[in-house]
Image: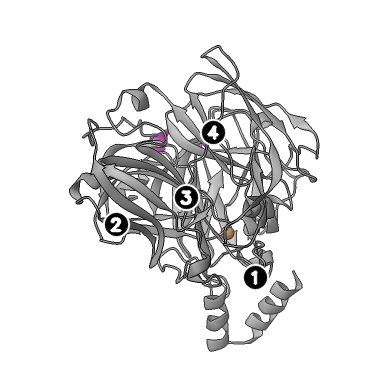
Amino acid sequence: MSKSKNISTICAVVAGIAAVGIILFINPINKGTGMNMSNTNNISKDAIINSSLPIPALLEDKNPDPKVDDFTLEPQQGEVSFIKGTETKTTGYNGNFLGPVIRVNKGDEVNIHVNNKLSEPTTVHWHGLELNGENDGGPDQAIQAGATWNPSFVINQQAATLWYHPHFSGTTATQVYSGLAGLFYVDDEISKNLNIPKEYGVNDIPLVIQDRSFNKDGSFKYDTNMMDGATGDTILVNGAIKPYLDVKRVKMRFRIVNGANASNFNLKLDNGSAFYQIASDGGFLESPISQKSILLAPGERAEIIIDFSKYDKGTKVSLMSDKTEILNFNVKEDGNDTTEIPGVLTKINKIEKSQATKVRNFDLQGMGNMVSINGQKFDMNRIDETVKQGDIEIWNITSENSMMHNMGHPFHIHGVQFQILSRDGKEPATEEKGWKDTVYIEPNEKVSIIVRFNNKGTFMYHCHILEHEEAGMMGQIKVE
Ligand SMILES: [Cu+2]
């Protein structure tokens, strides 16, 4: 806290070059410029465990009624060997690190039993789910150590790749960093009927991408000196360092979540080839988009299809984040691929500007511990905005830009999916025309979104750099 204050004070009185230097130092995630991360900074090459890509288990639904689902999640402590000869203390849901995939159908009644086996309070927030405030798992819904929380809700949104993670005040960032995160899939008639790769773990693969640093003894190094978020020098995919995946010469779908505390990932293939993006945060795009790279800020998701049939058996293809190999694909034998890249995926009903009844402005301000929204830090006892259920609103989100504050922020709203209207007055890129729940705001940029508040309750909106969220770059909206 004091460090950031000191730097602010120094910045205020030191002009020009010194201030620029500090801004560069504290600005590792400017979305336009990639990070120069080495995947093996503190880890010798021999110490990397060359494992195959871990595939999270699908969580068993204990309810025999196909329309009613019962799942049990147990946040707990664990231990993982990420680096040869060392053990890392971790946390996970129902296991040592990360969590199982929860998979539900649109229309299902979902009951989740969260048994907190940690020695501290936690919450479970369903990132991207449209539900009422009591089930959202925000910081006001603590599950004490040893206690149980039983949220129950009906799935009322299109097929999508969502995720879940803790959201307790003061420990969100450290609990996510130590391993608490998992995926939440929604299926509907469209996702079931599209002839795209959809066999879980076979040609439909989740990729949770995160960065971590390690101490010499193998323990996670959570660097609290990182003023604008805990970034790491090592990238994990599904909890493994530079794993490999053997693939047949077929089309493969990857559901990617940026589960990092603070880092953006600029994803591409080492050979520069294009792939197809088929979904954004909240579901399918209208049509597949050919992309050579995808930039994901913390909290954002994308689904892509890579066609491995164009490579000969024996080819190695790598998924990169900037210049770092993060996942190696070994192309194996032919497969019997009957899937296709459809011309049309879904129809997205555009929310019209004319339907909006109110415009609100949110300015994301400051840096380090000095962050705020519209000059105010988060206060659990203060409702910042009140909305009527069913109302449609335009939210203008800006990221303050000055010599002092030159940062981008991923802005997330709980309990809704929204549409991007414009970036600095310009139409958003095609891949941003789908449903979103997290949008990256570049420094000095104004992004307008349109959102319908379908569900009642109190919800958070915040920067998804977890350390910014913890430092107060968060507000509360009450839908009544
Ligand atoms: Cu931020």
Q: Nearer the viewer, mark 1 or mark 3?
A: 1
Q: Are marks 4 and 1 in contact (CB under 8 Å)?
A: no
The residue carrying mark 3 is 439
- How packed mark 3 is, by other alpha carbons closer than 10 Å (few <14, some 14-19, many 20 or more), is many
Residue 273 seen in render = yes
Mark 4 or mark 3, which is nearer the start of the sequence? 4
Q: Nearer the viewer, mark 4 or mark 2?
A: 2
Mark 1 or mark 4, which is nearer the start of the sequence? 4
User: Which of the labelled discs sits on residue 316, or is there none?
Assistant: 2
Kind of element beneath mark 4: loop
Give left or right: position of 478 versus 242.
right
The residue carrying mark 4 is 129
How many numbered discs sit on the rendered protein?
4
The residue carrying mark 1 is 216
* Furthest residue toward top: 65
Magenta segment range? 351-357
